[in-house]
Amino acid sequence: MSASGEERFIAQHLANLTDGFPGAFGLTDDCAELTPLPGYALVFKTDPIVEGVHFLSDDAPEDLGWKALAVNVSDLAAKGARPVAYLMALTVPGKPDDDWMARFTGGLQKAQDAFGCVLVGGDTDRAPDTGVPSPLSIAITMIGEVRSGRMVKRAGARPGDLICVSGELGGAALGLQLRLDEGFGRSWLAEADRAAALAKYLRPQPKLGLRPALQTCARSAMDISDGLIKDLERMCRLTGVGAELKLDALPLAGGLRAALKVDAATAVMLATSGDDYEVLTTVAPEMAADFEAMARRGGVSVSQIGQVTSTPEVRLLDAAGVQIEHRSSGYDHFDRAIL
Amino acid sequence: MSASGEERFIAQHLANLTDGFPGAFGLTDDCAELTPLPGYALVFKTDPIVEGVHFLSDDAPEDLGWKALAVNVSDLAAKGARPVAYLMALTVPGKPDDDWMARFTGGLQKAQDAFGCVLVGGDTDRAPDTGVPSPLSIAITMIGEVRSGRMVKRAGARPGDLICVSGELGGAALGLQLRLDEGFGRSWLAEADRAAALAKYLRPQPKLGLRPALQTCARSAMDISDGLIKDLERMCRLTGVGAELKLDALPLAGGLRAALKVDAATAVMLATSGDDYEVLTTVAPEMAADFEAMARRGGVSVSQIGQVTSTPEVRLLDAAGVQIEHRSSGYDHFDRAIL
């Protein structure tokens, strides 16, 4: 009575990712078990990534492992929550070879070590074979911990709040363009900016260092996954407010500063496209100095990019105060919205 | 600044499923929040169902909604845990029409009302379009609650334990056969048994009424999703034990009692195939009477089907004590194991 193929697969490739966490039961049980620390609540997020929708078929397995976890951890970071554990449902077309799995779980291991969480459960299925390969799907459910009542909500922005964003914008969209077309932006893109954009797309870095600043100072927060304008509009709608953003204040990724001079429309489109996984937050003006100081202490750069308004509309203004038209429809084939 | 298509989709089809649960934030936030009752732990399970692997393309949307939740709740039931909440990641080929979604969420609503849990978060993606439709995938992550330290483990069976199973076996596999071939078993299958088998396949009933009996009396437990023998072997391997099962003692689904006389091999194969979502458990002999009494009080029928042995092998014996050969390879196209 020898172990089944599935048991061997789990033991060989996945069991190590539990890092001995007791409630994972070495991935031999049907369920995982977890209790938050006294005074803490658990928070949950599931954000699958699917081949052809959220990543390209020739992305490296190491990068997929990293990205599948990072996009979920990013949501927790924006809520001020600490990543604790995750479940993973893998749907794999055909039989995954050991080399692919070793590289994929290598990326996961690096990511979970960086973010401070472990695998506690999941499921592996073979995708149906209908003559053409079904897409690879990696569905992670993230479990985090936050002091009870301190989860930073998406709803909460009030007129007068300052709008802040972490890190840089547009790098991931530029990186995706470069993955689709190596020659993109050749006339204006420096080699270092090119490498940074690819890294930003392939290996998003959730801003966990911002958690104390968010918990203490933020009125509302979310991570930017579908683009600055789209996500800010969602945030504003929840409290019936709007926003004015200043193009000059946007922390553009290196490559886009150059692009802005050559082709401003493309630069704006990339800067407001998705996949940056930065934190978007609104802060009462009197908390702004504390927020910036705590962010700096957490090793995260933040920029003030505009202000919440009572007019329910999100406007992007140039240096002269003129509204810039922005289209976010250019990347529909990679748009994760369903309708 | 009107709501996006995705926001309308969530508001129209999914928000009601939260049933006002505070930590779901009306599905408008990035994360859900949950705290177990004092003295309780949370348990987690994710078990996606994928078109062409776990269900057929022409299964009714109402049945898919029910089944997607039931297969996950079944795991919790076997652990003695109470369902509380779930997240759902939907990957839909093309644009789901309102009628399909209404029927699908209608099935979910019935299931969550029956099982006592609510939707708290999730994600909806369109499956990639590569010329052929990608499969529909419904990935639910279930969150349950159990008194700390009282989750019933899969590991724990000891030689001498009685092996018990809830409900009936083989009905789901028979139901699947009937879905694939309407004429299957026409010579021996009564109409009522036929309807029961289809219901068992399409609408599995997690045995939540067994929770008190399991918490108090079980040494080990798991739900049967991949077949009695396969799952019992997994359970036995964890403590290096084996088992002897008596064919005569198996609680065969109605249709299979008749089949046993006509074609015993097919009857045995169906009885040991997957998808029954009954609870398999081992109980110390001195606890057997209590277990049965508590199960009865919970409205769940249970059968003693054999005994745990120290020889690490699972054997199925006929009335004369002769070992019955069983092949579980007949349903590989529907086998959820990956290797």
Image: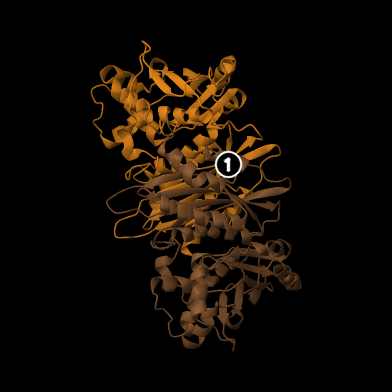
Chain colours: A brown, B orange
Residue at the spot 25% in from the left edge and 33% down from the top edge: B182
Q: Is residue B44 above or below residue A286?
A: above
B190 sits to left or right of A201: left
Q: Quadrant of residue B251?
A: top left
Quadrant location, the C terminus of chain B = top left
Who is closer to the viewer here, A240 or B156? B156
Residue B116 can be seen in this image:
yes
Q: Position of residue A104 (x, y in %)?
A: 47, 55
Where residue B241 appears, as percent x and y from the top left, is 50, 24
Residue lying at the far bottom in this picture: please name it: A320
Amino acid carrying mark 1 in the image: Ala
Taking A163 as reference, is A9 left or right?
left
The crowd level at tag 1 (other Cα within 10 Å; few <14, some 14-19, many 20+) is many
The residue that label 1 is drawn on is A24
Q: Is residue A273 visible?
A: no
Which of B110/B81 is in front? B81
A146 w.r.t. A54: above or below: above
Residue sitting farthest toward the top: B320
Whole-percent x, y for residue A5 in the image: 41, 39
Q: Which chain hosts label 1?
A: A
Percent position (x, y) of residue B271? 37, 25
